Amino acid sequence: MRRTFKLCLMLLAVLIFASGCGAVKGSNGESNRNYYAVVVDHMGREVSIESEPKRIVSLAPSNTETAFALGLGSRIVGVTDYCNYPEEALKIDKVGGFSNPNTEAVIALTPDLVLAGNMHDEQVKKLEEMGVPVLVLNPESMEETFEAMIMIGKATGNSKEADAVIDDMKARLKNIESKISSIPEEERARVYYEVSSDPLMSAGSASLINEAITLAGGKNIFADVDERYPKVSEEVLIKRDPEFILFPGSHGSSSFDPQEIAARPLWNEITAVKENNLFDVSADKISRSGPRLIEAVEKLAKIFYPELFEKG
């Protein structure tokens, strides 16, 4: 009898120890057992996910594009009005705008994971109160875009798919770098990207657009401005004499008509206008921190240095 009792105690101790070994520490320091995944997001929040997410809501176009690229399209049940790529995203239930999604609409979709952005503080708080795990993603560079992919992959069980997308993007970046590496810094293309014509706004060093230009071998003439999208002086712009002028092709405004840009007073002094180097670039590709960012970089590199890419 005594021996049986001792064996029971030993078995209980083993079970307790084994359970403890499988535990994951939560943000409050307590032991969280049996979580499917625990991910630290871009806000430094430790997000615990109990089971494999089957119903995902995305509150940002970049998150939506990334989720689809990672093979999660069939699991996405809600997106914003601005999630327009891929085409399948247009058929998914909408939860409102990018900056002001409707929390009630999100909850009504009964998600077990929400992919949010850094401007969704109010929504994140309400969703967490309802027990819905929310991953806040705020990539502001190519490297942080890779981080976001890794986070989504880990949270959903699609890490292999995330690695494959990242590897492909890195290989394409390496190909660009190998072709432009011989161009001295002082000879790299001077580039002006027009965000808005009234007021005149461009892309500063804090923007993803600036990084895309740099990765493509160009020199953003307003890279010395710390803001993301600063108002700029026409006088300074003309003085800095860009060799290429880029504008958002999907903007849909007549102010981005290349003929109108070329006809602006005094702009005929600019090298880009003299040489007709005015190009539209997809605003979605160049400003969204998602898998299509590499397509924007590739297009820019071919615009700046066509002779280096003629052979593929």
Image (spheres, grey):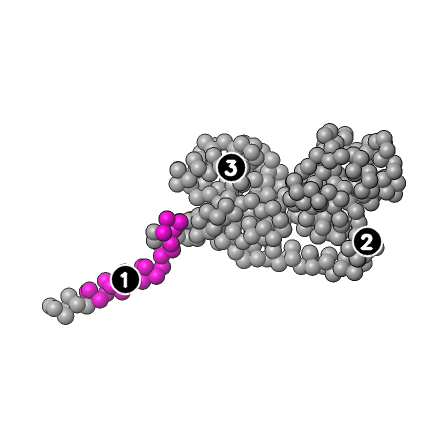
For residue 160, what is the image quadrant? bottom right
Q: Can you say whether 13 is above or below 24 in the image?
A: below
Q: Nearer the viewer, residue 225 or 173?
A: 225
* Residue 176 horizontal/vertical position (percent): 73, 56
* Residue 140 horizontal/vertical position (percent): 60, 46
**Residue position for label 2:** 187
Q: Can you say whether 116 is above or below 25 in the image?
A: above
Camera-nearest label, 3 or 1: 3
Q: Residue at x 79, y 47 (%)?
A: 190
Residue 77 in magenta?
no
Magenta segment: 8-29
| Three-letter amino acid code of the residue under disc 2 | Glu
* Residue 148 horizontal/vertical position (percent): 55, 50
Residue 17 in magenta?
yes
Q: Residue at x 56, y 47 (%)?
A: 67
**Mark 2 burial class by Cα count in 10 Å: few <14, some 14-19, many 20+:** few
What is the spatial separation of the Cα atoms under label 3 and label 2, in whole angstroms?
42 Å
In primary-sequence order, the first of circles 1 and 2 is 1
* Helix, strand or loop at mark 3: loop
